[in-house]
Image: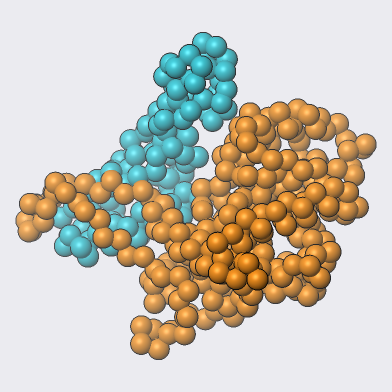
C-alpha cells in the first residue's frame, strides 16, 4: 500500500515502483498532484457537532471522482509534454500486443513511443514490447480487472518517456470494466478481432460508446469465417455514431498504413499548443 | 466485475469525509446508480461488505437507489425511458437518442455516528 497518497491498491504492482517511501523521504517526483477534494457540503453543517445519535450527511459525490481527478492530472501532464496517449482496450486474445509490437517495430525510426502494459499477472507482455526496443513498464493489477488513473500516474514516475512521444496504454483484456475508468488518455481505441463475433458492440456497448477508434483486427482470417463486417460496423455505429473504424491485420500488415496515418494525425493534434511544437 | 473497485472508491471517499466531518461510524450508505452506468447492483451489494471490512463502514447497510435511463429523441423531442445506450425511439425509431439520465454513479448520503 502506498503511504504517500494512501492508495489502497494492495494487489497492484508496478515494475520498478516500490512502496517503501514515506511523507518525508519519498522518491516520487510527483508529476501528478494527488487531489484531495474539499467539497462544499452546504446544508448539513449544523449537525456536525452532534455526537452519538446518528445523523444524515449529504455527499452527492461521484464514485469515480477520485479516479477522474487523477485522470485530469495525467491529462494535464501529457498535454504539457506534448505526449499523445492512447488507451487500448479489447477482450483477451484480440491481438492487441501483436498489433502494438508491429506498430512499434515499423514506426520506431519515425516516432518516439513508450508503452504501459496492464495485465493481471506476469511481465510477459512488457518483455515482448521491450524486445522491439521501446520503453515499457508493466502494471500487474492482481485481481483487478482494469487499470485506473492512479496506477497510470505511478507508472509514469518509472517510465522514461521523451516529450512529444506517443504513449500506448495497453489495458487489461476486458471489454467491460476499463470503459468506466478515464486514465487521462486522448482517446480510447477498441480492438475487436473478427474471430469474436459481430455482435460484440451491442453486447458491450459502454466500451464501444467510449472509444473514438475501432480497429477491426485479424481481417486476413475473414475468408475462413462467417463474420459479417458490415453488420458489425453497423452495430458499432449504432452504439457510437461518431466512431472511426479501420480494418487491419496485425499479422499480415494489411490496413496498418491507415492506422499509422491515424497515429500521425492524432500526434499532430497533441502537439498543437505544445511549447516546442513550432520548431 | 469492477464493482469491487467502485466499492473501494466509495470507502475511500467516506474515509475522507469522516476526517472532514468528524464521524466514526457509518450505519447506512446510500448510492444512486443509473441503469446505464454499467454497474451490476447484485455485484455491488456483494462487493460492498468485502470492501467495507476493517473500515468505519464495516457492517453498514448499502442502500442503492436505481435511476432509470431517460433519453430525448432529437426528432420527435419526446422523453423516453431507455434500458440500453442503443435503444431506438419507440415512436419514430430514430437513434441515437440523447441520454439525459441513467449514467449516475453517486454517493448520495450517509447515515453516520
Residue that appears at 67% across and 45% down? A213
| Horizontal relation, residue A46 to residue A204: left or right | left
Residue that appears at 41% across and 19% down? B79
Q: Residue furthest front?
A: A278
Question: Looking at the rendering, in which quadrant would you find the C terminus of chain A?
Answer: bottom right
Question: Looking at the rendering, in which quadrant would you find the N terminus of chain A?
Answer: bottom left
| Horizontal relation, residue B112 to residue A5: left or right | left
Residue that appears at 63% across and 28% down? A238
Q: Is residue A242 visible?
A: yes
What chain is the orange one? A
* Residue A209 locus on image (x, y percent): 58, 39
Q: Tell how many labels.
A: 0
Q: Residue furthest top?
A: B91
* Residue B72 locus on image (x, y percent): 45, 22
Residue that appears at 76% across and 36% down? A197
Q: Colour of chain B?
A: cyan
Look at the picture and state if B96 lies above or below A74: above
Choose between B50 and B76: the one closer to the eye.
B76
Q: Is residue A140 visible?
A: no
Q: Residue furthest bottom?
A: A25
Residue B57, by quadrant, is: bottom left
Look at the picture and state if B61 lies above or below B93: below
Choose between B70 and A273: the one closer to the eye.
A273
Look at the picture and state if A185 lies above or below A5: above
| Horizontal relation, residue A68 to residue A277: left or right | left
Look at the picture and state if A176 lies above or below A129: above
Query: What scheme was used to colour the molecule?
Result: by chain
Choose between A102 and A117: the one closer to the eye.
A102
* Residue A85 locus on image (x, y percent): 61, 60
Q: Residue furthest right?
A: A223
* Residue B77 locus on image (x, y percent): 44, 17
Choose between A258 and B19: the one closer to the eye.
A258
Amino acid at each position: 500500500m502506498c503511504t504517500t497518497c494512501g492508495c489502497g491498491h494492495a494487489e497492484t504492482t508496478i515494475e520498478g515502483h516500490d512502496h517503501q517511501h514515506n511523507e518525508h523521504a519519498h522518491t516520487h517526483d510527483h508529476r501528478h498532484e494527488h487531489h484531495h477534494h474539499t467539497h462544499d457540503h452546504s446544508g448539513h453543517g449544523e449537525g456536525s457537532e452532534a455526537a452519538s445519535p446518528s445523523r444524515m450527511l449529504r455527499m452527492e459525490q461521484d464514485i469515480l471522482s477520485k479516479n477522474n481527478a487523477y485522470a485530469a492530472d495525467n491529462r494535464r501532464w501529457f498535454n504539457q509534454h506534448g505526449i499523445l496517449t492512447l488507451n487500448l482496450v479489447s477482450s483477451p486474445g484480440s491481438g492487441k500486443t501483436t498489433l502494438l509490437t508491429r506498430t512499434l517495430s515499423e514506426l520506431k525510426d519515425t516516432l518516439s513511443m513508450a508503452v504501459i502494459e496492464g495485465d493481471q499477472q506476469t511481465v510477459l507482455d512488457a518483455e515482448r514490447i521491450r524486445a522491439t526496443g521501446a520503453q515499457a513498464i508493466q502494471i500487474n493489477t492482481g485481481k483487478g480487472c482494469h487499470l485506473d488513473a492512479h496506477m497510470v500516474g505511478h507508472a509514469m514516475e518509472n517510465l522514461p518517456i521523451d516529450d512529444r512521444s506517443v504513449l500506448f496504454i495497453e489495458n487489461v483484456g476486458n471489454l467491460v470494466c476499463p470503459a468506466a475508468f478515464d486514465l487521462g488518455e486522448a482517446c480510447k481505441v477498441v480492438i475487436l478481432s473478427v474471430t469474436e463475433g459481430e455482435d460484440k458492440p451491442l453486447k458491450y456497448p459502454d466500451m464501444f460508446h467510449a472509444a473514438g477508434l475501432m480497429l477491426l483486427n485479424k481481417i486476413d482470417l475473414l475468408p475462413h469465417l462467417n463474420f459479417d463486417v458490415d453488420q458489425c460496423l453497423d452495430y458499432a455505429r449504432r452504439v457510437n455514431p461518431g466512431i472511426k473504424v479501420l480494418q487491419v491485420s496485425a499479422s499480415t500488415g494489411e490496413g496498418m498504413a491507415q492506422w499509422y496515418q491515424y497515429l500521425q494525425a492524432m500526434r499532430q493534434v497533441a502537439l498543437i499548443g505544445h511549447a516546442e511544437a513550432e520548431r | 466485475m469492477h464493482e469491487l473497485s467502485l466499492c473501494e472508491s466509495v470507502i475511500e471517499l467516506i474515509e475522507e469525509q469522516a476526517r472532514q466531518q468528524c464521524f466514526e461510524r457509518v450505519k447506512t450508505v446510500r448510492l444512486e446508480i443509473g441503469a446505464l452506468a454499467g454497474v451490476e447492483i447484485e455485484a455491488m451489494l456483494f462487493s460492498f461488505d468485502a470492501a467495507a471490512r476493517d473500515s468505519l463502514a464495516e457492517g453498514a447497510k448499502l442502500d442503492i437507489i436505481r435511476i432509470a435511463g431517460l433519453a430525448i429523441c432529437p426528432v420527435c423531442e419526446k422523453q423516453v425511458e431507455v434500458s440500453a445506450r442503443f435503444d431506438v425511439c419507440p415512436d419514430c425509431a430514430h437513434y441515437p437518442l440523447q441520454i439525459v439520465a441513467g449514467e449516475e454513479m453517486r454517493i448520495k448520503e450517509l447515515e453516520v455516528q
